[in-house]
């Protein structure tokens, strides 16, 4: 009799886990769904928690959430007063289900700032033609999960690109930038810009990994960490101060 009671309790627990109202720690994913979310116009995006973010340039502002049906109610999509689209996964506790099941696709005509506090990548689905674009992966006040390890895999054409990081993120950036500033203040972020053609580049490198860059007309800044700045081209104007074991290296 005792074994039947245990089996019945286990069956009841498993059944109760397979719905959107189950306790977060044992809740199952449910069927995968794709749900459009109506949003106000935005110019910035912040992604938090375990969310994959895909960015696409298009004529209108659109957000599509891809996740499990049982998790959907805890995916927060909010445009804040300053025009920042904040994406959060409130499904915190997880004993039984797979991680990394939520992906959000964002379409926008323009974007000025992408901040990642997720451990999953931000990826462009087409080439992004924006005037100014800032990419940030570092600790900051006001973010629930201060993640700084999500990668950026983007193809861009911009007038000005700014990259700021102090964690573990990889920036794999291709395309064209008239002006770019890369600031690594701590830890081991990495910049891989072999295929990003930059006319004028400023660097501040105080971290432990490498910046691989392709400046054409100028490179300026400071290298004071242990990571190198590896330039695939020697531009006519070079003004970089090196104050630590990290080096500015040319072919």
Image: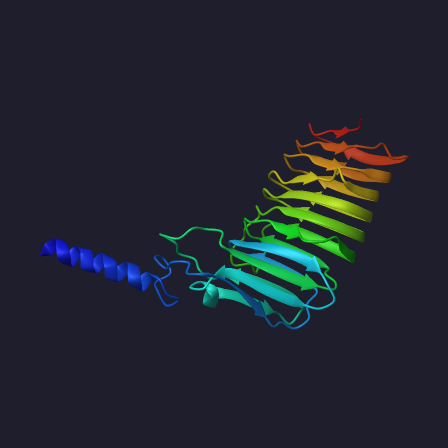
- The residue lying at 17 percent from left, 56 percent from top is 6
Q: Nearer the viewer, residue 17 or 4?
A: 4
Query: Does residue 184 show up?
Result: no
Q: How many tags in the picture?
A: 0
- The residue lying at 67 percent from left, 32 percent from top is 227
- In the rendered image, residue 226, in percent from the top left (x then y), is placed at 66, 31
Q: Residue furthest right?
A: 236
- In the rendered image, residue 120, in percent from the top left (x then y), is placed at 56, 49
Is the N terminus in the top left, top right, bottom left or bottom right quadrant?
bottom left
Q: Nearer the viewer, residue 181 or 178?
A: 178
Left or right for 213, reference 52: right
- The residue lying at 39 percent from left, 53 percent from top is 97
- Colour setting: rainbow
Left or right for 47, reference 90: right
Q: Nearer the viewer, residue 204 or 126?
A: 126
Is the C terminus in the top left, top right, bottom left or bottom right quadrant?
top right
Residue 236, located in which quarter of the rendered image? top right
Residue 30, located in which quarter of the rendered image? bottom left
- In the rendered image, residue 219, in percent from the top left (x then y), is placed at 83, 38
187 lies above or below 147: above
- In the rendered image, residue 68, in percent from the top left (x then y), is placed at 46, 60
- The residue lying at 10 percent from left, 55 percent from top is 2
Q: Nearer the viewer, residue 17 or 135?
A: 17
128 lies above or below 225: below
């Amino acid at each position: 009799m005792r074994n039947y009671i245990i089996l019945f309790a286990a069956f009841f627990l498993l059944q109760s886990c397979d719905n959107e109202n189950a306790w977060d720690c044992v809740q199952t994913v449910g069927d995968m769904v794709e749900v459009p979310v109506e949003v106000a116009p935005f110019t910035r995006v912040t992604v938090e928690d375990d969310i994959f973010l895909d960015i696409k340039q298009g004529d209108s502002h659109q957000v599509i959430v891809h996740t499990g049906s049982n998790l959907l109610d805890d995916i927060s999509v909010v445009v804040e007063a300053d025009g920042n689209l904040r994406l959060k996964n409130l499904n915190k506790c997880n004993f039984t289900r797979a991680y990394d099941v939520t992906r959000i696709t964002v379409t926008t005509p323009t974007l000025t700032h992408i901040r990642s506090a997720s451990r999953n990548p931000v990826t462009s689905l087409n080439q992004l033609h924006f005037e100014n674009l800032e990419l940030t992966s570092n600790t900051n006040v006001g973010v629930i999960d201060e993640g700084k390890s999500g990668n950026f895999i983007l193809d861009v054409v911009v007038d000005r690109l700014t990259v700021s990081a102090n964690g573990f993120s990889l920036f794999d950036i291709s395309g064209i930038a008239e002006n770019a500033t890369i600031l690594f203040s701590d830890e081991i972020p990495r910049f891989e810009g072999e295929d990003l053609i930059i006319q004028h580049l400023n660097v501040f490198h105080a971290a432990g990994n490498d910046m691989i860059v392709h400046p054409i007309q100028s490179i300026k800044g400071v290298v004071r960490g242990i990571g190198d700045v590896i330039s695939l081209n020697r531009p006519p104007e070079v003004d970089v101060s090196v104050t630590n074991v990290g080096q500015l290296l040319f072919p």
